Image (cartoon, rainbow, N blue to C red):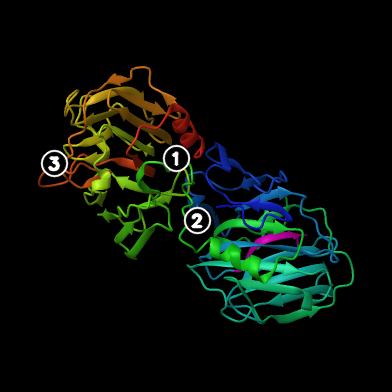
């Protein structure tokens, strides 16, 4: 959810990505501040099973509109004479007013509603229905500023980027609200701020403070990549932030280990393009154009938070991604590397350790790797030795946990790596992979068996890669660490 754009003056950033959001139990988690300021957020009234969702950029959090919020503590306290900017991506799901970001006293506090916020107001608002609203308040409403974007500038069930800048003038003319990178024409509700807006309550995402474990104006929907700056961002900088969330970039990968990369399927939202609720393709970001077609998958159930960004969830019944045969995928002359993050579900329906198992990758009669019904990882390649036969790596992938596996072959030795470390029972191999006799399509999540797909993978797969060379142990460790 983050990148190097616009870090000058950045004093708070919460991407909510998997690497930054650490669960210590099914209902307890913290989310890291990637600005470097250490303003860690505590997830409150949220659940590991329901709160992490696919975001606009990587992973987001979904808020139930009842009692969910993220608490950052008493940080990012600005005065009415300070310059600052704040906002993020929102996906509003209900016709209910809700706070995106707020450092504001509770109603009935002393004084009432002191602080600042940005909220969405619903269709019942008397001033500007379905809009974004900013408050800067000493005492509501006698010593306060409040402005709103145009009626119906905010809509539900769509991602929108909402960002606020304030120049410290204590006048509404110094407030700008941007939606999707465009500065909005604002309606003024109040313009009479002449005293402090500083308070001692906690900064919150997903609503305003109303008590230690309660929330005022709880937000209904998803929030992603929230940022706070101690300066006024320019129009161009805000456009950059918006574009970062809309451009075709790969949130699941980085520039590491691109030498010899012939196929890479991050399965992120930017690369996985749905043309209907059940039809999609996923792009190959290696540059070799090995686009995959999602088969028997659904936009509502197959898209899931990944280890790095977005992943795909396979039902173990008939789901797979089909990638047509191409010269770039005929690896193993003699070298190759296969890599992916996998999170198996229930594997009891998979085959024995000796195969056939539930497939992660399969290019039938050339190469494949899979998981067995005892959670063991195995592989097969068609070469001189061991020939087209399953070999058990001795490594396991626990159900319900993300694990990174890499399999390398250099023409004489096959090594399987788990979470950056090599297996102790590496197997000897000999000869090139036979890519001539059979030139079948590559599949992720199923076997390309003659006549029909079989051996379906149950679980999630993320950042799948194929190289035409054997990565070194150091490169494998680097690849693993990129997703930790």
The circle drawn on residue 432 is none
Q: Are marks 1 and 3 in contact (CB under 8 Å)?
A: no
Return the disc, 3 or 2, that comes first in the chain's sequence. Answer: 2
> How many neighbours does mark 2 have within 10 angstroms: few (below 14), some (14-19), or many (20 or more)?
many
Residue 213 seen in this snapshot: no
Q: Secondary structure at mark 1?
A: loop
293 or 51: nearer the eye?
Answer: 293
Q: Which residue is mark 1?
A: 257
> How many neighbours does mark 3 have within 10 angstroms: few (below 14), some (14-19), or many (20 or more)?
few
Q: Which residue is mark 2?
A: 55
The circle drawn on residue 438 is 3
In the shown orientation, is residue 145 left or right of residue 25? right
50 or 56: nearer the eye?
Answer: 56
Question: Picture quarter containing residue 398?
Answer: top left
| Residues in magenta, as a range | 97-106
Return the disc, 1 or 3, that comes first in the chain's sequence. Answer: 1
Q: Residue at x 27, y 46 (%)?
A: 328
Q: Secondary structure at mark 3?
A: loop
Question: Picture quarter containing residue 89?
Answer: bottom right
Return the disc, 1 or 2, that comes first in the chain's sequence. Answer: 2
In the shown orientation, is residue 470 left or right of residue 5? left
Residue 265 rendering spot, x and y as whole percentages: 36, 48
Q: Is residue 101 magenta?
A: yes
């Amino acid at each position: 959810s983050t990148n190097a754009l616009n870090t000058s003056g950045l004093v708070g950033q919460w991407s909510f990505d998997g690497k930054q959001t650490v669960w210590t139990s099914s209902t307890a988690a913290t989310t890291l501040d990637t600005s470097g300021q250490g303003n860690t957020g505590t997830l409150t009234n949220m659940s590991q099973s329901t709160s992490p969702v696919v975001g606009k950029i990587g992973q987001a959090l979904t808020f139930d509109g009842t009692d969910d919020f993220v608490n950052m503590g008493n940080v990012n306290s600005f005065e009415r004479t300070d310059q600052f900017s704040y906002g993020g991506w929102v996906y509003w799901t209900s016709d209910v007013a809700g706070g995106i970001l707020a450092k504001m006293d509770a109603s009935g506090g002393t004084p009432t509603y002191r602080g600042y916020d940005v909220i969405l107001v619903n269709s019942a608002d008397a001033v500007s229905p379905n809009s974004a609203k900013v408050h800067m308040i000493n005492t509501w409403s006698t010593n306060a500023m409040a402005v709103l974007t145009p009626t119906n500038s905010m809509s539900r069930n769509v991602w929108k980027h909402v960002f606020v800048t304030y120049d410290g003038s204590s006048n509404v003319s110094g407030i700008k609200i941007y939606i999707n990178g465009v500065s909005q024409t604002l309606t003024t509700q109040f313009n009479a701020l002449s005293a402090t807006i500083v308070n001692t309550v906690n900064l919150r995402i997903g609503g305003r403070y109303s008590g230690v474990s309660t929330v005022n104006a709880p937000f209904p929907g998803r929030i992603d990549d929230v940022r706070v700056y101690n300066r006024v961002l320019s129009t161009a900088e805000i456009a950059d932030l918006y574009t970062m969330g809309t451009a075709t970039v790969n949130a699941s990968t980085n520039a590491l280990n691109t030498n010899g990369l012939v196929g890479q399927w991050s399965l992120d939202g930017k690369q996985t393009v749905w043309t209907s609720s059940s039809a999609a393709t996923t792009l190959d970001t290696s540059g070799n154009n090995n686009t995959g077609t999602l088969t028997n998958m659904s936009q509502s159930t197959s898209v899931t938070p990944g280890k790095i960004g977005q992943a795909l969830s396979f039902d173990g019944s008939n789901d797979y991604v089909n990638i047509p045969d191409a010269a770039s995928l005929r690896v193993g002359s003699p070298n190759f590397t296969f890599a992916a993050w996998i999170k198996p579900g229930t594997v009891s329906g998979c085959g024995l350790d000796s195969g056939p198992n539930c497939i992660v990758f399969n290019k039938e009669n050339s190469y494949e790797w899979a998981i067995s019904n005892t959670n063991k990882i195995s592989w097969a390649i068609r070469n001189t030795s061991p020939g087209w036969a399953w070999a058990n790596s001795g490594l396991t992938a626990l159900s319900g946990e993300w694990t990174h596996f890499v399999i390398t072959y250099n023409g004489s030795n096959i090594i399987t790596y788990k979470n950056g470390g090599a297996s102790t029972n590496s197997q000897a191999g000999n000869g090139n992979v036979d890519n001539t006799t059979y030139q079948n399509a590559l599949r992720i999540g199923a076997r390309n068996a003659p006549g029909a797909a079989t051996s379906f993978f149950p679980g999630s797969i993320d950042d799948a890669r194929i190289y035409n060379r054997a990565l070194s142990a150091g490169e494998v460790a680097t690849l693993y660490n990129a997703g930790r």
